[in-house]
Amino acid sequence: MPRMNYYAYGGLDRAAALRQREEWLEHTLMEPETRLVPIWRNRNLVAEGDEPKPVLLEPEAARALMDGKRHTALLGVRDGITYVALDVSDLDEEEAQRRIATAGPRANFVDLRAVGPLMVREEGSLLAYARGLMYWHLRHRFCGLCGHPTLAKKAGHVLKCSNPDCATEHFPRTDPAVIMLVEHEGKALLGRSPRFAEGMYSTLAGFVEPGESLEEAVAREVEEETGVKISDVRYHSSQPWPFPSSIMLGFYATAETTDITIDTEELADAQWFTKAEMRDFDGVSRRLPRPDSIARRLIEDWLAEDA
Ligand SMILES: [Zn+2]
């Protein structure tokens, strides 16, 4: 199997057939083989300790969190265990923490970006999936067409408008973004956004627009951000990136021009770097993107090409 990017498939059977049975989720929430994956306002529940580990609650322990109207959604099945996301965002922070303490574990709701790279891959991927799905739930509580509340169907994978005259079904959305390493005669084009950590340079990236192919989006983004024209767009790999709701589509491309004119709205700087220069990044004044990003993977694979 090819090497997976962080947050990609974690050995989970998404068990789409189970979503078709209307009362299935409710029963499953009481089964001892079920584990609940709590989410609070896009944060995942992670155990305190040296190694970040997700807290997965047994139904009995989760009871303190299950009262009232909670959003739940089937994530999938792995090794006989059914994983279900449980959103508790309506609780204020203190109440959410109090109930978690009642449920047992010493744990906190944290941003997955802070702990993801340190986690076992399958666990990070499960949390990313739960976070992405619950982000969509939180933002689709009302129908975008008629404004009535939505109701969860298909084990939390459809949100249906409660207005019988409308009854529109809303499906989970993922926003495609392209990310690309542009190369030219042994050098790669990296840029830094004013939002980046000090010294960090990364591959260029941007969202795909309606009516545009991925290849066109790659070429447009590179030219908009740096003025560089490219050709020969090659697909590399993809990565779910639920921060908040993207799928990153990674590419390599070849530059046809090399003069750089940066878009100062998007970038603070962009430069051509040789492989030797990149390997010499000191991690302080110059650093590569975070280890769990596809940007890092694109760069590492490129550096390894003729090493
Ligand atoms: Zn509606």
Image (tube, rainbow, N blue to C red):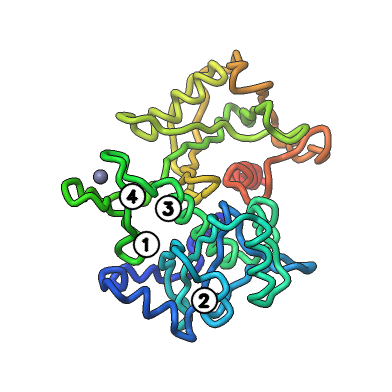
Residue beneath the point at 47% across and 55% down: 134
Choose the circle earlier in sequence order: 3 or 1.
3
Examine the image and state in which quarter residue 120 appears: bottom right
What is the three-letter code of the residue carrying label 3? His
**Residue 149 circle label:** 4
What is the three-letter code of the residue carrying label 2? Arg
Residue under numbered circle 1: 156
Residue 275 vertical placement versus 140 (above, below): above
Residue 235 seen by the camera:
yes
Residue under numbered circle 2: 35
Front-lying residue, 299 or 105: 105
Labels 3 and 1 touching (C-beta < 8 A): yes
Q: CA distance from mark 4 to mark 1?
A: 15 Å
Q: Nearer the viewer, mark 4 or mark 3?
A: 4
Ligand 1 resides in the quarter of the picture at top left
Residue 305 position, x and y percent, is 61, 45
Q: Secondary structure at mark 1?
A: helix
**Residue 137 circle label:** 3
Choose the circle earlier in sequence order: 3 or 2.
2
